């Protein structure tokens, strides 16, 4: 059997779309009409010509088997990535053999694919010896790192001073001083090259307006920021792992130099969060053989979807390397050995009590963790006044949903999927509550995206 | 939340006294200058000591989180016995539902099909095959039905019992409880007289209408009797709606009740009662109207060809008004012709053969009419044919589709013709419209096409395609025909797609054609073919019986 039999579902294709407009435009192009000379090859490539408004049709080609997730190229001028033509062609391909038959690629597609694969291969060989070449001038790199550390130290010291001033005058004053104070402090932290501190400071600014109970939340976050400052200033005395965690929380660059772990990685969830400048994509993976959970992060400039995209519910045979730091789940996707394929694998689940215990244990290694990835087994989405909770089917315990999760349409997909019966739910469990990301029905059935 | 402490990191802390956290928050809120936090020295180092203590407490509190108590779990949704949708069809549904109208704005349509427009057809087929939807699609399905009332009946039937269960949990979807018969309170078993009585006496208006319609559909007489029990106490608007539900299963047995309603206080109720009675050819009202109309119409034998002569009524008396004739003519219409039209409309059509020399409807329609009364008389006959669902008269009044007057603004307007077509069988309807299009083209055909059975029968489909082809060759722009194009996309038999292949290319532009029209036509035909293929695929996906499991 060739891997060509493995076509994605429309949902999985649409998950690649950078925004709702592209999703819609792509769906419209997911019909045979504008396409000609479309085809797909066994090694995981799809191509086609799409008639646009001009005289020359757009050339669209997709490499699904690429090591770093699907890669696309389209001759259209759109700045969306992937563009609607790529989405349309993939949808058409997802439908089956009729519109996109198997074949061998035409020259223009072949060229691009070959070029890409070659470059990828070069990168891998380069990557293997890259650590050596990257440290071409270890002395200079060390000096750079030292200079940066000095600036971060200055920033952390300044931040400590500001926190102390704040606590001396009282948090009640923070409500009046508003957002500006925090923005200015955040800018100082950016200058100090400590983006992790800057982001935390910016979040502090939003807390006084976040509704009842804000003093508690503000004190918590100030205290954890203080803890991070202290961690940095005293990093020489910390265990090496914890020091790495502090470095990554401060926002210093690190590389995924953990040993590559080859596994059948199930794509549990993929979702984007965006701020003014940056779109952050989080992809959760579950290793079917190792039982490990890994987080892939990918970034895109505002308005552009991050490049890495993996279809939820599929499994990919690949290598994954961890980033340093105690309790850090972040990893980088290495070589992919086969295109993503459908699977019946589901992650094993736990009860709500075990889920909270797991969060508690994770805090031991990384006290700044907001949540941990958990799969809950046999829970029933249950209305609880104005909010919702996931209640154990077999015990009188439940996890409340986070406020953000309650507002998302995914909640209703979850409730509909359950119909009052127990379901399996993957999500993030933390001090704010549980955020469901993916669910599986009680009986057979594929994973349902909730985010 | 101050659960049993979990040792955190390398800070071995003694379990703090209860209330420590609250004291820390208070101190932080007021500031260490005003309040010394517990266990700290006042002074310059107090804020730092407070932050230290708060950090330990925060992590301790978080690490000690426990699940909350479970609330009362919802009752499980009722089981849906229907087989699950085949996987391909489920994907198609997701795609159709993802195509929400609105964002597209006024843009050109291009060659891509309008997916939302295909949803009604998809739902009808899925309901026909008796499939159950994938549960996770219910929210978007309900949202779609919320935005488009025309989709609601089919969407809710397809959505099934779980959608009703779901709608109880989300106020946005409350319409599903109202719209589904038995959705909200669920209709009682219709044989359970006590429960029927209770719902009829105490139910909300919508529930009562649903109850009445349900009973009427099963046992018309019982529904009328139920209505009679409370008739005098109902409000006028409600009386009108209840009376309207008697339209289904209208029978001579309803006459006494309707006669009584002719004396109703509300004018609208009176008019509806009269309309219903006149649809019963054997009713006393129909006979009274026949007598009045008959007095106005006679056959004039003094001319060379027999001619119908009309003498419209000179007044509208109280009896006429009681029988539903509206005395005041709308602005711009003569009173006498207004009354005359109403009389003929309510007169059983079978009267006319006897009154006008035993002629068939066809012969009667062909007879000349004196003094410009033809328009008035024929229009009234049309309304009567529709009201009395008389196919023979409808056929006669429609005439031949290729007759020259069929295309122009003759005695019978397009809207009336569409209604008359509705009285014919589907095959005959399609053939008549095909003939009409072949003679008169597409510009007037939109309304008529709307009443034809879907998918269009082969002769009708061919006639439409040919006419589109002619319109293209004539050099106009395709958007002059966008209405018909849209209908063709939804109604043309997908099997016809292959016949359109020749039209997809961009033709050479003739001298007198509108600039660029050829390209736009090719695009429009491409969209048509794409849509037809999509519909064929849609139907095919729904045919597949899914194997067990996924």
Image: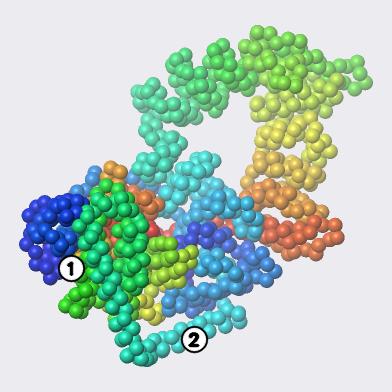
For residue B219, above or below residue B108? above
Q: Chain of mark 2?
A: A
Task: Determine the residue located farthest toward the top in the rendered image.
Answer: B318
Res. B237 in view: yes
Q: How is the image coloured?
A: rainbow
Of callouts 2 and 1, which one flags the residue occurring earlier in the amino acid sequence? 2
**Residue shown at 73% from the left, 19% from the top:** B338
Residue A74 found in image quarter: bottom right
Q: In the image, A399: left or right of A27?
A: left
Identify the element where label 2 is drawn.
helix
**Residue shown at 19% from the left, 51% from the top:** B30
Dot 2 crowding, Cα within 10 Å, few <14, some 14–19, many 20+: few
List the residue tagged with mark 1: A364
For residue B427, above or below residue B470? above
Whole-percent x and y of residue A349? 25, 62
Whole-percent x and y of residue A230? 20, 70
Q: Chain of mark 1?
A: A
Identify the element where label 1 is drawn.
helix
List the residue tagged with mark 2: A118
Res. B154 in view: no
Whole-percent x and y of residue B135? 40, 51
Dot 1 crowding, Cα within 10 Å, few <14, some 14–19, many 20+: many
Quarter of the figure with the C terminus of chain B:
bottom left
Q: What is the spatial separation of the Cα atoms under label 2 and label 1, in whole angstroms?
A: 44 Å
Viewer-proximal residue among B240 and B393: B240
Q: In the image, B120: left or right of B359?
A: left
């Amino acid at each position: 059997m060739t891997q060509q039999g493995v076509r994605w579902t429309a949902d999985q294709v649409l998950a690649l779309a950078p925004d709702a407009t592209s999703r819609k435009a792509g769906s419209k192009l997911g019909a045979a009409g504008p396409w000609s000379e479309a085809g797909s090859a066994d090694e995981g490539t799809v191509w086609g010509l799409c008639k646009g408004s001009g005289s020359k049709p757009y050339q669209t080609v997709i490499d699904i088997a690429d090591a770093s997730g699907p890669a696309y190229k389209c001759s259209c001028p759109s700045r969306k990535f992937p563009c609607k033509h790529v989405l349309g062609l993939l949808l058409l391909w997802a439908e089956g053999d009729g519109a996109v038959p198997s074949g061998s690629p035409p020259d223009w597609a072949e060229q691009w694919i070959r070029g890409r694969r070659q470059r990828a291969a070069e990168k891998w060989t380069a990557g293997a010896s890259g650590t050596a070449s990257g440290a071409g001038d270890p002395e200079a790199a060390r000096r750079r790192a030292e200079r940066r550390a000095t600036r971060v130290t200055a920033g952390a010291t300044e931040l400590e001073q500001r926190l102390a001033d704040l606590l001396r005058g009282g948090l009640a004053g923070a409500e009046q001083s508003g957002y500006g104070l925090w923005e200015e402090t955040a800018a100082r932290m950016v200058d100090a090259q400590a983006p992790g501190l800057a982001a935390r400071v910016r979040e502090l600014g939003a807390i006084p307006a976040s509704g009842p109970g804000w003093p508690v939340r503000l004190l918590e976050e100030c205290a954890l920021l203080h803890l991070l400052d202290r961690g940095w200033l005293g990093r020489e005395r910390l265990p090496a792992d914890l020091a790495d965690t502090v470095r990554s929380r401060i926002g210093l660059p690190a590389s995924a130099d953990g040993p590559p772990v080859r596994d059948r990685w199930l794509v549990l969830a993929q979702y984007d969060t965006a701020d003014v400048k940056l779109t952050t994509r989080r992809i959760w993976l579950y290793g079917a053989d190792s039982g490990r959970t890994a987080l892939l992060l990918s970034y895109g400039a505002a308005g552009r979807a991050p490049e890495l995209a993996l279809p939820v519910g599929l499994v990919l045979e690949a290598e994954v390397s961890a980033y340093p730091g105690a309790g850090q789940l972040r990893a980088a996707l290495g070589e992919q050995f086969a295109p993503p394929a459908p699977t019946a694998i589901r992650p094993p689940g736990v009860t709500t009590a075990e889920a909270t215990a797991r969060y508690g244990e994770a805090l031991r290694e990384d006290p700044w963790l907001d949540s941990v990835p958990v799969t809950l087994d046999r829970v029933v989405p249950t209305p609880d006044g104005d909010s919702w909770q996931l209640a154990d089917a077999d015990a009188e315990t439940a996890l409340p949903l986070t406020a953000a999760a309650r507002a998302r349409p995914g909640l209703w997909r979850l409730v509909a999927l359950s119909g009052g019966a127990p379901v399996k739910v993957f999500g993030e469990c933390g001090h704010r509550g549980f955020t469901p990301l993916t669910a599986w029905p009680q009986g057979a059935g594929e994973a349902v995206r909730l985010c | 939340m101050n659960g049993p402490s979990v040792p955190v990191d390398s800070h071995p802390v003694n379990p703090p006294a209860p209330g420590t956290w609250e004291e820390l928050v208070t101190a932080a809120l007021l500031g260490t200058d005003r309040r010394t936090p517990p266990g700290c020295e006042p002074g310059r180092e107090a804020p730092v000591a407070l932050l230290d203590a708060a950090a330990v407490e925060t992590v301790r509190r978080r690490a000690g989180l426990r699940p909350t108590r479970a609330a009362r779990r919802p009752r499980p949704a009722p089981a849906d016995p229907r087989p699950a949708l085949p996987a391909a069809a489920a994907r198609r549904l997701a795609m159709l539902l993802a195509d929400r109208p609105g964002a597209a704005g006024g843009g050109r349509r291009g060659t891509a099909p309008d997916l939302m427009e295909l949803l009604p057809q998809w739902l009808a087929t899925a309901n026909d095959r008796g499939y159950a939807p994938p549960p996770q699609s219910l929210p978007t399905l309900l949202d779609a039905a919320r935005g488009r009332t025309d989709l609601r009946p089919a969407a809710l039937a397809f959505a099934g019992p779980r959608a009703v269960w779901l709608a109880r949990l989300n106020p946005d979807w409350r319409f599903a409880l109202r719209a589904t018969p038995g959705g909200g309170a669920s209709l009682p078993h219709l044989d359970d007289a006590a429960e029927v009585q209770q719902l009829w006496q105490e139910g909300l208006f919508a529930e009562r209408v649903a109850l009445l319609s349900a009973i009427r559909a099963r046992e018309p007489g019982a529904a009328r009797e139920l209505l009679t029990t409370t008739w005098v106490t109902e409000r006028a608007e409600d009386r009108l709606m209840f009376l309207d539900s008697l339209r289904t299963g209208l029978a001579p047995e309803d006459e006494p009740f309707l006669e009584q309603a002719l004396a109703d206080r509300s004018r609208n109720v009176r008019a509806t009662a009269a309309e219903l009675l006149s649809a019963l050819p054997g009713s006393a009202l129909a006979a009274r109207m026949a007598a009045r109309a008959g007095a106005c119409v006679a056959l004039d034998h003094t001319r060379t060809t027999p001619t119908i002569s009309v003498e419209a009524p000179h007044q509208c008396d109280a009896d006429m008004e009681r029988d539903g004739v509206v005395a005041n003519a709308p602005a711009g219409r003569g009173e006498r012709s207004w009354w005359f039209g109403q009389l003929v409309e309510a007169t059983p059509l079978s009267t006319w053969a006897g009154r006008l020399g035993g002629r068939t409807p066809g012969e009667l329609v062909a007879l000349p009419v004196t003094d410009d009364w033809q328009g008035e008389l024929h229009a009234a006959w049309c309304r009567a044919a529709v009201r009395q669902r008389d196919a023979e008269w409808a056929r006669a009044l429609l005439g031949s589709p290729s007759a020259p007057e069929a295309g122009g603004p003759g005695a019978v307007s397009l809207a009336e013709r569409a209604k008359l077509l509705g009285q014919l069988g589907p095959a005959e309807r399609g053939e008549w419209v095909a003939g009409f299009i072949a003679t008169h083209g597409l510009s007037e055909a939109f309304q008529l096409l709307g009443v034809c059975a879907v998918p269009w029968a082969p002769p009708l489909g061919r006639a439409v395609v040919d006419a589109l082809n002619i319109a293209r060759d004539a050099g106009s722009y395709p958007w002059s025909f966008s209405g018909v194009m849209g209908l063709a996309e939804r109604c043309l038999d997908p099997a016809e797609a292959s016949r359109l292949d020749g039209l997809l290319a961009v033709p050479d532009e003739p001298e007198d054609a509108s600039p660029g029209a050829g390209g736009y036509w090719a695009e429009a035909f491409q969209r048509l073919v794409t849509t037809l293929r999509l519909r064929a695929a849609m139907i095919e996906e729904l045919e597949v019986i899914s194997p067990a499991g996924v």
